[in-house]
Image (spheres, rainbow, N blue to C red):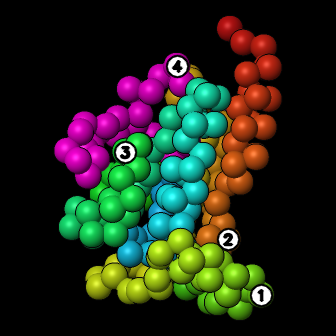
């Protein structure tokens, strides 16, 4: 697992629209790099919906968003791409980026998610937003999400590895971390 202060692993890929993406393109900006389960995941689509709603505030704070799904292009286009997000969605069906960033697959965390008392509330919220629970054939059901806030120097400000399926870095925390990070003196 990656830690705060480490250099973010670098990669080159394309988003689902065919645009080239590499984290070094965002040098000088903060980047919220969010990893999700698969394109059909209702909870993941709900979080993307929330990311879309938060884009004006994120952009005003100088934060660029990149999302990654352990799905192929077809699944992303069929599910999450329908939301027409104003940020890159990276298909990673071979989980190369997931491995690079140390994401886990955990049957025990999936089972504990199923026992959470707030699970039904999240399922209802996703359903109300138009995201029904469904299985993506061939997907890694035990994949856990994660969020990385990366600083302008491409160093990780925070690495948030999920304990349950809809465990993401709260937006309030993202804004607080960026504000705190910007106040720190530059070392050199």
Q: How far apart are marks 3 and 1 (CA)?
A: 33 Å
Q: Which of marks 4 and 2 is nearer the N terminus?
A: 4
Say which mark, if any, is on residue 82.
none
Tell me the residue at 76%/28% (across/down): 179
Judge by depth and name the residue closer to the eye, 27 or 45: 45
Q: Nearer the viewer, mark 2 or mark 1?
A: 1
Tell me the residue at 64%/49% (across/down): 159
* SS assignment at label 3: loop
* SS assignment at label 2: loop
When asked about the image quadrant of residue 3, the answer is: top right
Q: Find disc 2 in the rendering and name its residue.
A: 163
Q: Find disc 3 in the rendering and name its residue.
A: 88
Give residue 84's position: percent from left, percent from top. 36, 53
Q: How far apart are marks 2 and 1 (CA)?
A: 14 Å
Q: How far apart are marks 4 and 2 (CA)?
A: 30 Å
Q: How far apart are marks 2 and 3 (CA)?
A: 25 Å
């Amino acid at each position: 697992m990656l830690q705060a202060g480490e250099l973010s692993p670098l990669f080159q890929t394309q988003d689902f629209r065919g645009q080239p993406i590499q984290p070094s393109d965002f040098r000088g900006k903060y980047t919220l790099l969010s990893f999700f389960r698969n394109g059909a995941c209702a909870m993941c689509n709900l979080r993307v919906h929330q990311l879309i709603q938060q884009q004006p505030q994120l952009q005003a704070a100088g934060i660029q968003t990149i999302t990654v799904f352990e799905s192929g292009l077809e699944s992303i286009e069929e599910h999450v791409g329908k939301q027409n997000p104003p940020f890159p969605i990276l298909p990673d069906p071979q989980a190369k980026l997931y491995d690079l960033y140390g994401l886990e697959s955990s049957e025990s965390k999936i089972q504990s998610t199923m026992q959470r008392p707030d699970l039904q509330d999240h399922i209802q919220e996703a359903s109300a937003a138009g995201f029904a629970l469904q299985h993506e054939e061939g997907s890694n059901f035990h994949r856990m999400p994660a969020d990385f806030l990366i600083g302008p120097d491409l160093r990780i400000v925070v690495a948030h590895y999920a304990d349950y399926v809809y465990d993401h870095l709260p937006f309030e925390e993202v804004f607080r971390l960026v504000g705190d990070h910007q106040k720190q003196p530059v070392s050199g």
